[in-house]
Image (spheres, rainbow, N blue to C red):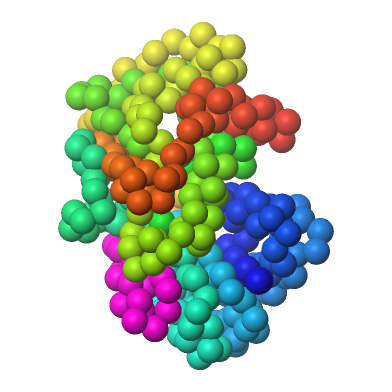
Amino acid sequence: MRALVTGAAGFLGRVLVRRLAARGLPVRALVRGEAPGLPAGVEVVRGDVTDPAALARAVPGCDLVFHLAGARRGATRDGYLRTNAEGTRLLLEACAAAGAGSARFVLAGSLAASGPSREPRREEDPFQPVEWYGESKAEAERITLSFRDRLPVTVARPPRIVGPGDRENLLFFRLVHRGVLLRFLGPERPISWIDVEDCAEGFLALADRPEAVGEPFFLASAERTTTTGLQRVIAGALGATPRELPIPPAALRAAAALADGLTRLTGRKLPLSRKLARQVLAPGWCCDPAKARERLGFVAATPLRDSVERSARWYLEQGLL
């Protein structure tokens, strides 16, 4: 049995590849550029998910396909759809063309496809994305499940992923390390999350269990937090005593618009953006992990404190703080 992992050089991809290799499975990694740090023996195929020729090289002989590659940032709606939705279609078509009809196909979906909510989203709820990334992930999921009469497909929908190697939450670690904790004014905005190791284990459960075929699953910890709560846990992990800085929503939106303007003018990507502001000020980003627990026996058991402490150590070791 051989496993293909697209996006193998990414945050979650590296952990998943390591876990597959630890199981003794031959692993083929589809990556766009260099991929240092992958386990010895991993076969590397260079290419992009939007390139049919690269996919034709990557897919043959694979019994498991984990599709993690995708665009998280982009300037246009078409760019997101081309990579996240059309790239998914091309990979599914390559699997079907290679005669890989028995190969389990696991798509890395996203809570962003369901959209923000204070109440926990469930798998049967309609998609309500609020930005291009979420829209493209919703379309990728629809495309994947449309192949279920040709391939054994399944979809993982993780929320925010935390752990060593994460770059999405680095801004909050840096601010807390420098003595500032941002407290966004307004009602509490609950957030679902999952540790990266638990997330990889969830992907393996989707690949292993027959009950997963043809179905989407939220993979999340039962422990929820908020942006402020996450920063307080970060402060504990770093041994910091930051001062809380209350931020009115209007001030955050204005600062984010200014940051986007500076990014366009200078070409330098700033950590603040209107996309980040919309995410932070959404009513919440919650999902219910009950389906994965009840049908697959999957539980994301890592406490937030443990995940954040491992992240903090990694940031410090890498000189990122």
Mainly helix, strand or loop, the magenta region?
Answer: helix
Quadrant of residue 46 in the image?
bottom right
Quadrant of residue 321 in the image?
top right
Residue depicted at 35% across the width and 37% down the height: 192
Residue depicted at 55% across the width and 49% down the height: 200
Residue 42 sits above or below residue 171 on the image: below
Residue 39 sits above or below residue 302 on the image: below
x and y percentages locating residue 271 in the rendered image: 48, 40
Residue 73 visible in the shown view: no
Residue 130 visible in the shown view: yes
Highlighted range, magenta = 134-154
x and y percentages locating residue 24 in the rendered image: 73, 59
x and y percentages locating residue 298 in the rendered image: 44, 45
Residue 108 sits above or below residue 260 on the image: below
Q: Nearer the viewer, residue 56 or 49?
A: 56
Q: Is residue 138 magenta?
A: yes
Q: Can you say which quadrant of the picture contains the N terminus? A: bottom right
Residue depicted at 40% across the width and 41% down the height: 220
x and y percentages locating residue 67 in the rendered image: 51, 66
Q: Nearer the viewer, residue 283 or 186?
A: 283
Residue depicted at 41% across the width and 51% down the height: 296
Q: Is residue 203 magenta?
A: no
